[in-house]
Protein backbone atom coordinates (compact mmCIF):
# COMPACT_ATOMS: atom_id res chain seq x y z
CA UNK A 1 0.00 0.00 0.00
CA UNK A 2 2.83 2.37 0.89
CA UNK A 3 4.62 1.57 -2.40
CA UNK A 4 1.47 2.39 -4.38
CA UNK A 5 1.17 5.69 -2.52
CA UNK A 6 4.81 6.58 -3.19
CA UNK A 7 4.48 5.72 -6.88
CA UNK A 8 1.29 7.81 -7.12
CA UNK A 9 3.01 10.79 -5.47
CA UNK A 10 6.02 10.47 -7.80
CA UNK A 11 3.79 10.28 -10.88
CA UNK A 12 1.81 13.30 -9.72
CA UNK A 13 5.01 15.24 -9.05
CA UNK A 14 6.37 14.30 -12.48
CA UNK A 15 3.15 15.44 -14.15
CA UNK A 16 3.26 18.74 -12.27
CA UNK A 17 6.91 19.32 -13.20
CA UNK A 18 6.15 18.52 -16.84
CA UNK A 19 3.26 20.99 -16.85
CA UNK A 20 5.44 23.68 -15.26
CA UNK A 21 8.08 23.03 -17.93
CA UNK A 22 5.46 23.43 -20.68
CA UNK A 23 4.21 26.64 -19.07
CA UNK A 24 7.72 28.12 -18.94
CA UNK A 25 8.44 26.94 -22.49
CA UNK A 26 5.29 28.69 -23.74
CA UNK A 27 6.51 31.95 -22.16
CA UNK A 28 9.96 31.57 -23.76
CA UNK A 29 8.86 30.63 -27.29
CA UNK A 30 8.54 33.33 -29.93
CA UNK A 31 5.07 34.86 -30.22
CA UNK A 32 3.81 36.52 -33.38
CA UNK A 33 4.57 40.22 -33.21
CA UNK A 34 1.78 42.79 -33.11
CA UNK A 35 1.07 46.31 -31.86
CA UNK A 36 -2.03 47.23 -29.86
CA UNK A 37 -3.60 50.36 -31.38
CA UNK A 38 -6.80 50.42 -29.31
CA UNK A 39 -7.73 48.75 -26.03
CA UNK A 40 -11.39 48.55 -25.08
CA UNK A 41 -13.16 46.92 -22.16
CA UNK A 42 -14.06 43.73 -24.03
CA UNK A 43 -11.59 43.62 -26.94
CA UNK A 44 -8.51 45.23 -28.46
CA UNK A 45 -7.49 46.26 -31.95
CA UNK A 46 -4.07 45.08 -33.13
CA UNK A 47 -1.84 45.74 -36.08
CA UNK A 48 -0.06 42.62 -37.33
CA UNK A 49 2.83 43.16 -39.76
CA UNK A 50 3.42 40.73 -42.63
CA UNK A 51 4.71 37.31 -41.61
CA UNK A 52 5.48 33.96 -43.24
CA UNK A 53 3.13 31.08 -42.42
CA UNK A 54 3.08 27.38 -43.18
CA UNK A 55 -0.53 26.52 -44.00
CA UNK A 56 -2.67 23.50 -44.79
CA UNK A 57 -6.15 23.77 -46.26
CA UNK A 58 -8.90 21.48 -45.10
CA UNK A 59 -12.55 20.54 -45.52
CA UNK A 60 -12.92 20.38 -41.72
CA UNK A 61 -16.06 21.94 -40.25
CA UNK A 62 -15.02 21.90 -36.57
CA UNK A 63 -11.89 23.07 -34.78
CA UNK A 64 -11.42 19.62 -33.26
CA UNK A 65 -11.46 18.02 -36.70
CA UNK A 66 -9.12 20.69 -38.10
CA UNK A 67 -6.68 20.27 -35.21
CA UNK A 68 -6.53 16.48 -35.44
CA UNK A 69 -6.00 16.48 -39.21
CA UNK A 70 -3.78 19.54 -39.63
CA UNK A 71 -1.50 19.87 -36.62
CA UNK A 72 0.55 16.76 -37.37
CA UNK A 73 1.18 17.74 -40.99
CA UNK A 74 2.47 21.18 -40.02
CA UNK A 75 4.48 19.79 -37.11
CA UNK A 76 6.24 17.34 -39.46
CA UNK A 77 7.28 20.25 -41.67
CA UNK A 78 8.96 22.22 -38.87
CA UNK A 79 10.49 19.09 -37.29
CA UNK A 80 12.47 18.22 -40.41
CA UNK A 81 9.86 17.22 -42.97
CA UNK A 82 11.34 19.53 -45.57
CA UNK A 83 13.92 19.34 -48.35
CA UNK A 84 16.73 20.62 -46.09
CA UNK A 85 15.67 18.50 -43.08
CA UNK A 86 15.80 21.78 -41.17
CA UNK A 87 14.32 21.92 -37.68
CA UNK A 88 12.32 25.14 -37.32
CA UNK A 89 11.36 26.47 -33.89
CA UNK A 90 7.71 26.27 -32.88
CA UNK A 91 6.09 29.65 -32.34
CA UNK A 92 2.68 30.79 -31.17
CA UNK A 93 -0.12 31.18 -31.88
CA UNK A 94 -1.50 28.54 -34.22
CA UNK A 95 -4.04 30.14 -36.58
CA UNK A 96 -7.26 28.25 -37.31
CA UNK A 97 -9.96 29.36 -39.71
CA UNK A 98 -13.22 27.42 -40.07
CA UNK A 99 -15.55 28.64 -42.79
CA UNK A 100 -17.98 27.35 -45.41
CA UNK A 101 -15.52 27.68 -48.28
CA UNK A 102 -12.04 26.59 -47.21
CA UNK A 103 -10.87 25.91 -43.67
CA UNK A 104 -7.17 26.21 -42.80
CA UNK A 105 -4.56 25.86 -40.07
CA UNK A 106 -1.31 27.83 -40.04
CA UNK A 107 1.95 27.86 -38.09
CA UNK A 108 3.71 31.23 -37.90
CA UNK A 109 7.33 30.92 -38.97
CA UNK A 110 10.03 32.49 -36.74
CA UNK A 111 10.63 36.15 -37.60
CA UNK A 112 14.20 35.50 -38.79
CA UNK A 113 12.88 33.68 -41.86
CA UNK A 114 11.65 35.07 -45.18
CA UNK A 115 9.62 32.89 -47.51
CA UNK A 116 12.54 32.56 -49.93
CA UNK A 117 14.96 31.18 -47.31
CA UNK A 118 12.63 28.54 -45.89
CA UNK A 119 13.00 24.99 -47.20
CA UNK A 120 10.30 23.50 -49.40
CA UNK A 121 7.88 21.18 -47.56
CA UNK A 122 8.03 17.49 -48.48
CA UNK A 123 4.26 17.25 -48.03
CA UNK A 124 2.65 19.13 -50.93
CA UNK A 125 -0.36 19.93 -48.71
CA UNK A 126 1.84 22.29 -46.68
CA UNK A 127 2.12 25.69 -48.36
CA UNK A 128 4.36 28.62 -47.46
CA UNK A 129 2.81 32.06 -47.82
CA UNK A 130 3.58 35.60 -46.77
CA UNK A 131 0.65 37.45 -45.26
CA UNK A 132 -0.10 41.15 -45.70
CA UNK A 133 -0.26 43.70 -42.90
CA UNK A 134 -3.63 43.62 -41.19
CA UNK A 135 -5.70 45.15 -38.43
CA UNK A 136 -7.72 42.74 -36.32
CA UNK A 137 -9.99 42.86 -33.31
CA UNK A 138 -9.20 40.26 -30.65
CA UNK A 139 -10.88 38.79 -27.59
CA UNK A 140 -9.14 36.29 -25.28
CA UNK A 141 -10.37 33.34 -23.22
CA UNK A 142 -8.67 30.55 -21.27
CA UNK A 143 -8.89 26.79 -20.86
CA UNK A 144 -9.35 24.11 -23.49
CA UNK A 145 -11.27 25.72 -26.35
CA UNK A 146 -14.48 23.83 -27.11
CA UNK A 147 -16.68 24.50 -30.11
CA UNK A 148 -19.15 26.19 -27.74
CA UNK A 149 -16.39 28.42 -26.28
CA UNK A 150 -15.51 29.51 -29.81
CA UNK A 151 -19.15 30.33 -30.63
CA UNK A 152 -19.67 32.26 -27.37
CA UNK A 153 -16.54 34.37 -27.80
CA UNK A 154 -17.21 34.94 -31.49
CA UNK A 155 -20.65 36.32 -30.66
CA UNK A 156 -19.13 38.38 -27.83
CA UNK A 157 -16.61 39.99 -30.18
CA UNK A 158 -19.20 40.50 -32.92
CA UNK A 159 -21.58 42.29 -30.54
CA UNK A 160 -18.80 44.45 -29.06
CA UNK A 161 -17.68 45.60 -32.50
CA UNK A 162 -21.24 46.45 -33.45
CA UNK A 163 -21.67 48.55 -30.29
CA UNK A 164 -18.36 50.31 -31.03
CA UNK A 165 -19.39 50.91 -34.69
CA UNK A 166 -16.26 49.15 -35.96
CA UNK A 167 -16.75 47.37 -39.30
CA UNK A 168 -15.29 43.89 -39.66
CA UNK A 169 -14.85 41.59 -42.66
CA UNK A 170 -13.81 38.04 -43.44
CA UNK A 171 -14.28 35.05 -41.16
CA UNK A 172 -13.68 34.94 -37.43
CA UNK A 173 -10.52 32.96 -36.67
CA UNK A 174 -9.21 31.20 -33.59
CA UNK A 175 -5.67 31.53 -32.24
CA UNK A 176 -4.35 28.77 -29.99
CA UNK A 177 -1.26 29.45 -27.91
CA UNK A 178 -0.58 26.09 -26.25
CA UNK A 179 0.15 22.48 -27.23
CA UNK A 180 -2.79 20.09 -26.66
CA UNK A 181 -1.08 18.36 -23.71
CA UNK A 182 -0.51 21.60 -21.73
CA UNK A 183 -2.96 21.83 -18.83
CA UNK A 184 -1.88 25.03 -17.08
CA UNK A 185 -2.01 28.64 -18.29
CA UNK A 186 -3.91 27.96 -21.50
CA UNK A 187 -4.76 30.92 -23.76
CA UNK A 188 -6.99 31.23 -26.80
CA UNK A 189 -8.23 34.18 -28.85
CA UNK A 190 -10.86 34.95 -31.45
CA UNK A 191 -9.83 37.51 -34.07
CA UNK A 192 -11.41 39.12 -37.11
CA UNK A 193 -10.17 41.66 -39.64
CA UNK A 194 -11.42 45.20 -39.09
CA UNK A 195 -11.49 48.41 -41.06
CA UNK A 196 -9.24 50.72 -39.06
CA UNK A 197 -8.09 54.21 -39.94
CA UNK A 198 -6.05 55.62 -37.06
CA UNK A 199 -6.40 59.14 -38.45
CA UNK A 200 -10.08 58.96 -37.62
CA UNK A 201 -9.54 57.65 -34.09
Image (tube, rainbow, N blue to C red):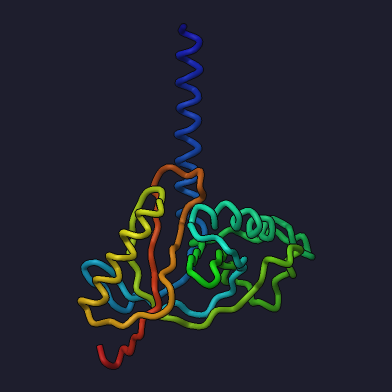
| Most foreground residue, 40 or 98 | 98
**The quarter of the displayed image where residue 126 is located:** bottom right
**The quarter of the displayed image where residue 159 is located:** bottom left
| Most foreground residue, 126 or 89 | 126
Residue 179 in picture, x, y percent from top left:
51, 50
Residue 123 in picture, x, y percent from top left:
74, 63
Residue, x 35% and y 80% (percent of image)? 168
Q: Relative to 159, does residue 17 appear above or below in the rendering?
A: above
- Furthest toward the bottom, the residue is 199
Residue 127 in picture, x, y percent from top left:
66, 71
| Most foreground residue, 87 or 77 | 77
Q: Is residue 92 left or right of residue 72?
A: left
Q: Is residue 179 left or right of residue 85?
A: left
Q: Relative to 88, does residue 146 appear above or below in the rendering?
A: above
Q: Is residue 139 left or right of residue 100?
A: left
Q: Is residue 179 left or right of residue 149?
A: right
Amino acid sequence: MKIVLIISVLLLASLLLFQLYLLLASYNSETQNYRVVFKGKLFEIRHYPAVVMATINSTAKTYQELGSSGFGKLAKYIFGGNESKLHIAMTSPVHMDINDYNSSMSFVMPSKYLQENLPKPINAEVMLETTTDEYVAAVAFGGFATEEDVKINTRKLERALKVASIAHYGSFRMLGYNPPFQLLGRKNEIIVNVEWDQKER
